[in-house]
Image (cartoon, helix red, strand yellow):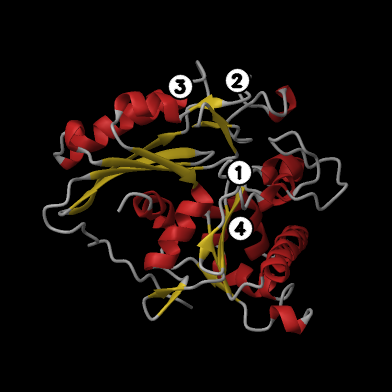
Amino acid sequence: MIQNVLSDGFQLPAGAAPVACVDIGGTKVAVSIADALGVRGRVAEPTAKEGGRDALALQIIRLVGRSCQLAGVKSADLSAVGVSSCGPFVLRDGLVELAAPNICGGLAGKARGLPNDWTTALLEAPLRQAFANVRVENDGIGALEAERRWGALQIKGQPLSHCAYVTWSTGIGVGLCVDGHVLRGKNGNAGHAGHLFVSDNDDALCGCGNVGDVEGLIAGNAIPRRFGHLGYTDSATLFIASYAGDTRAAAIIDELCRVMGRTLYNLVVTLDLQRISIGGSVFWHHRELLIPKLQSHVRGKLAALTDGCELVPAGLGERVGDFGALALVA
């Protein structure tokens, strides 16, 4: 198993101005400050999903201020703010708004259970009013960049040219690199393989409004929606039951891995990849169980395309989101 290659002692060069690192997920927002003394002052809160459409941006501005206080840094001294965010993105006047299924309740409607009717959440415009230099990227791209620089998507310190990062967490996110080029697309949304249609299953409502896409079937927030009536109220409960010998829970996990495994296979054969690193809370806490199950859906199938492609745990482990934001501005 590839071990973490970026220590907690990571530092910017001596004399470098501090930067803020913002990781936005469907469950939480985390902010930290990086400078010549290291990565410090980490704060995190549940992602804002109530109030006006600028609630998330206002939360980030407040958390950046709090993180600066903890790190002993002045907000005015920040040279940049890197924002690694779940998507998709919508560009309005060239600025990113979020149309994120796990944040914006107006996409799938009341059936999704989110406490707002937003179709987009304001993000980049309010941040640019507060900070001089802001870079916003899809969190799959941020994690991909971090894994290529410091994690599992490199060989002997050189970033791989044909690779992907996949997160299996609250949602399903992907970052893609082909021929040494990170793929972004017209609105920065390349890699949203979590919204590939893979099933006609009518209980798999995704927050985007689709029924039967990958995220709606297997994401962390899909598990209680689909299997809560069986007593599996979250992913942890499902896996605990499986480890305890619950054959029904084990069968459900096998089915989740079939969907994710086929998704990974599709990425490999479409993009001719040499390695995929996988992170996210659902995967990371059960990686030793899940890796061989996922590999079984890739290895031995159309060997001309799948031979030579590895599936590995993220080299940056649970910190891949934090360092994904850092990779955008460091």
Q: Give the residue type at disc 2.
A: Asn
Q: In the image, what residue occupies the spot 46% across and 29% down?
A: 123
The alpha-carbon separation of the residues under discs 1 and 2 comes to 28 Å
Chain-order first, disc 1 or disc 4: 1
Mark 1 or mark 4: which is in front? 1
User: Mark 1: few, some, or many residues within 10 Å (few <14, many ≥20)?
Assistant: few
For label 2, the residue is 116
User: Mark 3: few, some, or many residues within 10 Å (few <14, many ≥20)?
Assistant: some
Q: Can residue 285 be seen in this snapshot?
A: no
**SS type, badge 1:** loop
Q: In the image, what residue occupies the spot 16% across and 54% down?
A: 36
Q: Residue furthest top?
A: 52
The alpha-carbon separation of the residues under discs 3 and 2 comes to 11 Å
Chain-order first, disc 4 or disc 2: 2
Q: Can residue 97 be seen in this snapshot?
A: yes
Mark 4 or mark 3: which is in front? 3
Q: Left or right? Give the position of 228 relative to 199.
A: left
The alpha-carbon separation of the residues under discs 3 and 1 comes to 26 Å
The alpha-carbon separation of the residues under discs 4 and 2 comes to 32 Å
Mark 4 or mark 2: which is in front? 2
Chain-order first, disc 1 or disc 2: 2
Which numbered circle lies on residue 240?
Answer: 4
Q: Give the residue type at disc 3.
A: Ala
Q: In the image, what residue occupies the spot 45% across and 27% down?
A: 56
Q: Which image quarter: residue 108?
A: top right
Chain-order first, disc 3 or disc 1: 3
For label 1, the residue is 186
Mark 4 in CB contact with mark 3 (< 8 angstroms): no
For label 3, the residue is 55
